[in-house]
Amino acid sequence: MSQTTIQLDEQTAAAATIRLPNGKAVNVQSNISIEADEIPVIDVSGIYSEDIEMRKMVAEKVREACHRIGFFYAINHGIDPQLSSGAFEQAKRFFALPIEKKMEVDTALVPGEFVGYHAMEQYGSKNRKQNDLSEAFNIAYDAKYDPDAITDEPSRSIFLPEDDLPGFKDGLYAYHTQILQFARKMTRIFALALHLPEEYFADYVKQPEAGMRILHYPQQEHSEDDQNGIGAHTDFECFTMVTQDGSGGLEVLNKAGYWIKAKPVPNSFVINIADCLMRQTNDFFVSTVHRVINKSGNERYSIPFFYGFDRRKVLEPVPTCISEDNPMKYQLMTSGEYYIWRASKAKDGEL
Ligand SMILES: O=C(O)CCC(=O)C(=O)O
Ligand SMILES: [Fe+2]
C-alpha cells in the first residue's frame, strides 16, 4: 500500500492524474470502472512439474501478464481451499470484536512497521470527502511457522492475548505457511519469466518479507469520487497474492487509464507486481495501480499476502532488463530501506 495524490483535471472532473509515492504519475480517463477480460487467468499447475519445459510454459504466460498489465489470476495453485475458508473465519471473528479490544493492537504502537490493527476510516486521500471504508489487521513473517526457516529471529507481528481470541494466530499462520511455500515456488517462476536461471532469487527469499493482511470492507453508500474501500495505490514489495471472497470490488488501472473490475475467480489468487520488482526489472514488469470499492451489498473480506525479498538484500537490477541503451532508472537501496520508507509514509496517514 502507499499514499497517492490525485489531481483532478480542469476540463473534466472524471479524468485525473494520480501521483504515486513510487515516483510515477498515471492518468485516469474515468473514475467509473468497467467490465473487461483483460486480466489473464493462468493455470499454474505446471510449476510443480519435473519437466522444466512445463515450468517455462507457465513462466512465459507470467512474463506476458506482468509486462502488459501487472496482474493475473493464478488457478490450480494446489492450496487446500479449507485453509482460506479457515482464515476468512478468523478474519470475521477478529473484526467482530469491540473497537476498544481491536485498538489494543493498534498499528500505531509499532511505528514504521506494517503490523497490527488499522482502524476503519482512518486513512484516505485529501481529494475524497470520506476516508477509506475498510479495516485491516496485518501479520509479519514468523520463522516459527516457516518449515524452511534459516533464522530464529522473533517476528514483528503483534497479537491480542491468546485467550481473547483462541486459535486466531494459528488459524492465520496455517494459511500463511502454505502461501509462503507457494510464493517461494513462484519466485523461481518469476526468475524464468525474466529469462534468468530458476535459482536466481533463491538467496533473496530464504528469510523473506512475507506479511499477510486480513481486510474487511462494509458495503459503501458514497460514490467512488467521495469514498473508496482502499484508494488508488501500488504495493511496495515484490509481488502480492490476494485471496478475495465472492463479493468483487477490486479494480485495476490498465495502461489506457481505465479501471477494470478484477471479478472474483473461485479458488484463485489475484497476483500483482509490486514496486520492488518493478524497480529491479527497470519497469519491464509494471507495479499496477489498484483500489477497492465495495458496492456488492455484502460485507467484503480479503486476504492479501505481500511477498518481498530479504530486507538486507540490495535491490540490484535484473541483468536481462538493463543494457547500454536502457540503463537502470532507480537508485540502489536495500529492500529494507525501501519498505521502511514506504511503510512510514503510508502510516503518516497517507493511506
Ligand atoms: O482487498 C483487496 O482485494 C486488495 C487490498 C489491497 O490492495 C492492499 O491491501 O494492498
Ligand atoms: Fe494493494
Image: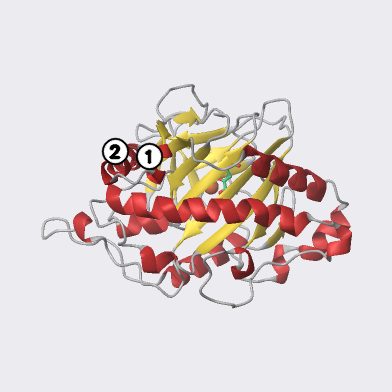
**In the depicted view, which residue is nearer to us: 304 or 43?**
43
Is 43 placed left or right of 109 in the picture?
Answer: left
User: What's the residue type where badge 1 is placed?
Assistant: Gly
Is 278 placed left or right of 150 in the picture?
Answer: left
**In the depicted view, which residue is nearer to us: 136 or 60?**
60
Q: Which residue is mark 2?
A: 57
Query: How far across and how far down the image is residue 181, in percent?
Result: 51, 55
Relative height, residue 298 to residue 346 (above, below): above
What secondary structure is marked by label 1? helix
Tell me the crowding category of disc 1: few under 14, some 14 to 19, or many 20 or more residues within 10 angstroms, Cα based. Answer: some
Q: Which residue is mark 1?
A: 46
- Quadrant position of residue 248: top right
What secondary structure is marked by label 2? helix
- The CA span between labels 2 and 1 is 8 Å
User: What's the residue type where badge 2 is placed?
Assistant: Met
Could one spot residue 332 in this view of the protein?
yes
Is 133 placed left or right of 100 in the picture?
Answer: left
Relative height, residue 307 to residue 86 (above, below): below
**In the depicted view, which residue is nearer to us: 56 or 294?**
56
